[in-house]
Amino acid sequence: MHTSLEVAAVFLHARQPKDPVVRMFRMPHRVDPKSVERDFEKLLRMRGGRSKNGYVVRDLIPAQERLHFELHDPAVLALREDLVGYGSVAKVGDLFTKVPSVNRHTLGEKTSSTGQPGAARVLRGTDVLTDGSIAPPDPEDIWAQVPSDCLLQAGDLILRSISRPTDRHRFVVSEVGDEDLPAAASEHVIALRRKVPLETHQLRFILLFLRSPMAGPMLAQAGVHILWRDLADLTLPQPDEALASALDNLEISKRHLEEWHNEADDLLQSVFLDQSAAQGRDRIVRSGQTLRLRVAAASLLDDLGHTVRTRFPYPVALRWRETEAAMSVRDAGPAYQAILGTAEILLAYSALLVGALAREEGIELGSIHAIRGQLERGRGPGFGEWVATLDEISSKRKRRSLPTEHPLNALGAMFADEQVADARKRLYLRRNDEDHERRVDRVDLPQARDAAFDDLSRLIEGARFLADWSLIQITDLHWDALLGRSVIDYRNLMGDHPVVPTSTMVLDRSDIEKGSLYLKDQENRLHLLRPFLVGCLCRRCRSWSTFHIDKASQGTVTLKCLEYGHTFDDPALLGPLRHVGLL
């Protein structure tokens, strides 16, 4: 303690030889003392759990263990364990080493002037700014001749070693750039240097975490000073492949938006720079058109209908477009039927994906056996069978061996939202009533139509992940045995029209089928959908359509079109359907 302070020590002797639990309490500031006292008394009576300002540790803390509040806090421990959900975790000390700092008060004659050869700027804590940048040099800076091992390098991270109330439990951290050199860290700055290679997205994620309010409480910190030994033990989340890809896409989108913003700003600033008013007017009108179209196109993405029409798989997108068209006319009857039909097709498509993906992963589904029983009795699958398949895959037990980014996890969580699940139940009841001649009275049809459309919209919202997966048909492929890769031509059947241009991709696979439908997920992996879902020209209307099994009898398979409900027989699918357990 400082010599100016007078210390009064109080020694408390326990009435019992050993308390089986440890209670930790943190005194809050600017709070009614009575409420603090009541909370403390409550904690003393507790044998486990948490009070407002404290918690109970059931196991005695080892004598050599530090007693920092956050180090044993159950809430912090749970938060630390939850970080694995981002992908993986690592300690700061595993990824970074500390760069030696320079004590400004011991520099003495080593100080130099700006620009002197060999002189480095000694960065203070105030030079690390909250926006992630480093303050530009100013006259109050100290420049000095420092040891070479203290010199910072581009890519090093520096953070304030003294936290302030205004930091709000965040670390104030910046990345050193070439423009900030030569520089060294003072005693109030902790400099970190990578000891292992880190990808750009990994470093970006680390910076996002350190600057978030989640990071501060996870540091077992005594007082306002951040010590390297505590920081080295801090757990950092690391993104998995899907999250890393999403972060990269966000960064690319951010740069595009900044470019468009700067382009618009430059255009506004140049309004009066032309030689004549007529020239200026024509240039602004012409150049501004592209920017206006960009904004208009981007604004449409907030419209659910536009997203479904342009980014959902063809069978669902086409049905949605027909529903929107029916909603625009006064007769509520066709719109009501179109809504119920679109809901069934959405669930049918999703359930067929589940069937194909589950077979690929070797997951046994009782709902698929139920569909086989239906087919053996001469009846095809309907709304109830599709719902049963989606309900079954919602069980985490069925998906426990799958990686987080596998499409079955998104399909399994389709009805996790209570409002989405309720909307699906109401639509199922409406569809069931229609099939059993319990139709809505014409007087009540407008209200029933609007309510059903609201439920369909919620169901579509719950299935937004479908917009991130492509339904593709392989049109041609060429396998190069020497290079061990396939050059594949395919049609991306997303949006409300089947006439789309052909694209090309290269895969290190030789088992791709020409003519078959595949699901291309966010990781660009291909999943075979045949024979759960096949694509071909409809023999009735000659339009390209997607089909699933509807009936099977006397050695003949009847396929049904998701888009129009047309049917035709195809005995060639008997073998594949038996192979996957549908027959």
Image: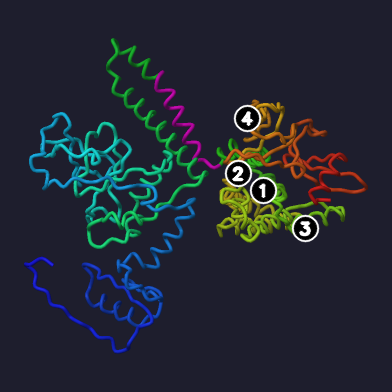
Residue 107 figure quarter: top left
Residue segment shown in magenta: 286-304
> Which mark's residue is nearer the viewer, 4 or 1?
4
How far apart are the alpha carbons under marks 2 and 1? 9 Å
How far apart are the alpha carbons under marks 1 and 3? 25 Å
- Residue extending farthest to the left is 4
Q: Work out which quarter of the rendered image holds the N terminus and state it.
A: bottom left
User: Mark 3 highlights which residue?
Assistant: 436
User: Mark 2 highlights which residue?
Assistant: 466
Q: Compare marks 3 and 4 and give the one earlier in the sequence.
A: 3
Q: Residues within 10 Å of mark 1 (few under 14, many from 20)?
A: many
Q: Position of residue 512 (x, y in %)?
A: 71, 35
Q: Is residue 370 left or right of residue 257?
A: right
User: For the point 13% across and 29% down, which residue is it?
Assistant: 116
How far apart are the alpha carbons under marks 3 and 2? 31 Å
Q: Compare marks 4 and 1 and give the one earlier in the sequence.
A: 1
Q: Residues within 10 Å of mark 3 (few under 14, many from 20)?
A: few
- Residue extending farthest to the top is 275
Does the magenta segment cover residue 296? yes
User: Mark 4 highlights which residue?
Assistant: 506
Q: Residues within 10 Å of mark 4 (few under 14, many from 20)?
A: few
User: Mark 1 highlights which residue?
Assistant: 350
Q: Is residue 571 left or right of residue 162?
A: right
Q: Main secondary structure of the magenta part?
A: helix
Q: Is residue 434 left or right of residue 177?
A: right
Q: Nearer the viewer, residue 407 or 339?
A: 407
User: For the point 33% across and 15% down, which residue is it?
Assistant: 280
